[in-house]
Amino acid sequence: MFGTPKAIHRIVAGALIASTILLHPSASWALDDVTLITDFGYNGRHAYFFEALDRGYYRDAGLEVKIVRGQGSVDAIRQVGAGNAMFGFADAGPLMLARANDQIPVKLVAIVYVKPPQAIFCREDSGLKKPKDLEGNAIADNAGGATPALFPAFAKAAGIDAQTVRWVVATTDSLPGLLATNKVPCVSQFTMGEALLQSKIGPTKLVRFAFADVGLSYYGNGIIATAATIASKPDIVRRFVEATVRGMKDAFADPAAAGAIMQRLVPQVDATVAKKETEAVAELAQIPGKPLGEIDPARIEATIDMVKGAFKLTTPVTAADVYVPGFVPTR
């Protein structure tokens, strides 16, 4: 009743195979699900995230990554704080404000923009030639953007009255069109977004008022996560940062390839614009002799000082409140 020896052998072999499948699930089954929310829609400046995705660097790190579009750094910080995304790409300044004034326990685990990326771009035919000319004029941006949040610091450094500037709330995607059709004289945009704006407004020239040009020096965007995620899932944080840095290295080494990948995965993004934005990000992100993504404690302190000098904070903020070291690969 037990069957022939061959039949018994087949039964035992089948059982062994089944147990092996259960003990060693497929790679896709083993991947950790991760959501990243961008700071500002899908743009060429995000190409290295998509390169890491396309080349399988996240999967190599055991991660199944979904990239969703944000509506500004403030939005990304709130979404991560609410648990709607594990990681975010957001500006250090608004993060510090969120920590001090709203008690959102979100921290930086890697930095990308080591220099201020914020700027105001105006049509040259609007007649605005210097920061003082912004007084009494309109600037469009989304409600959750980093530039409006940090504009008082720019205004203070430039010697202008921030209260006289009128902010027009618009979606991230509509900003180039508003400028191109002259609905507003100016829009806020990161410096690497100049190529996108220029491509939309044609022969009309742009005037740029960069925050760095008035002497501001602080950290811009980096990768963020909640304090709870960092404490409970440090290995996932480390793997995500390392895979992203791999994507950054590839993108900076070949911006044209990064632009092509970005357009293939997000067709509405022009490959040439993405290439130029990636080149601009490379300039903001790289310091000779320093690992990509590394957070400098002194630079964090300088960013905190900038925020404290321009804003009223309801609770004090220390470096330990806003960043955690140790997640960036050193080579």
Image (spheres, helix red, strand yellow):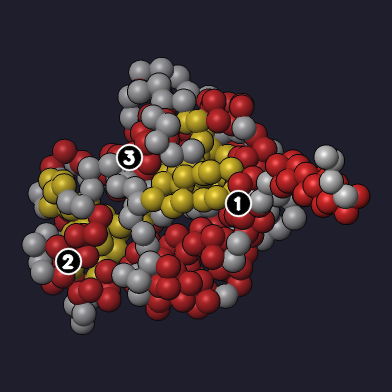
Task: Give the distance between the C-alpha atoms of the residues marked 3 and 2, in whole angstroms.
Answer: 22 Å
Q: Quadrant of the C terminus?
A: bottom right
Neighbours of disc 2 within 10 Å: few (<14), some (14-19), many (20+):
some
Vertical placement of residue 85 versus 132, above or below: above
Say whether disc 1 or disc 2 marks the residue closer to the N-terminus. Answer: 1
Q: Nearer the viewer, residue 278 or 125?
A: 278
Asked if labels 2 and 1 touch by Cβ distance under 8 angstroms, the answer is no
Residue at the limit of the structure toward the front, as seen here: 1
Q: Which residue has dot 1 on it?
A: 28
Q: Nearer the viewer, residue 89 or 187?
A: 89
Q: Which residue has dot 2 on it?
A: 177
Q: Is residue 246 left or right of residue 46?
A: right
Amino acid on which disc 1 is placed? Ser
Neighbours of disc 1 within 10 Å: few (<14), some (14-19), many (20+):
few
Q: Which residue has dot 3 on it?
A: 75
The residue tagged with tag 3: helix, strand or loop? helix
Mark 1 vs mark 3: give the one in front. 1
The residue lying at 57 percent from left, 75 percent from top is 254
The residue lying at 10 percent from left, 49 percent from top is 136
Residue at the limit of the structure toward the top, as seen here: 315
Task: Give the distance between the C-alpha atoms of the residues marked 1 and 2, in whole angstroms.
Answer: 41 Å
Asked if labels 2 and 3 touch by Cβ distance under 8 angstroms, the answer is no
Q: Is residue 125 left or right of residue 120?
A: left
Q: Where is residue 197 drawn, in percent x and y?
A: 27, 69
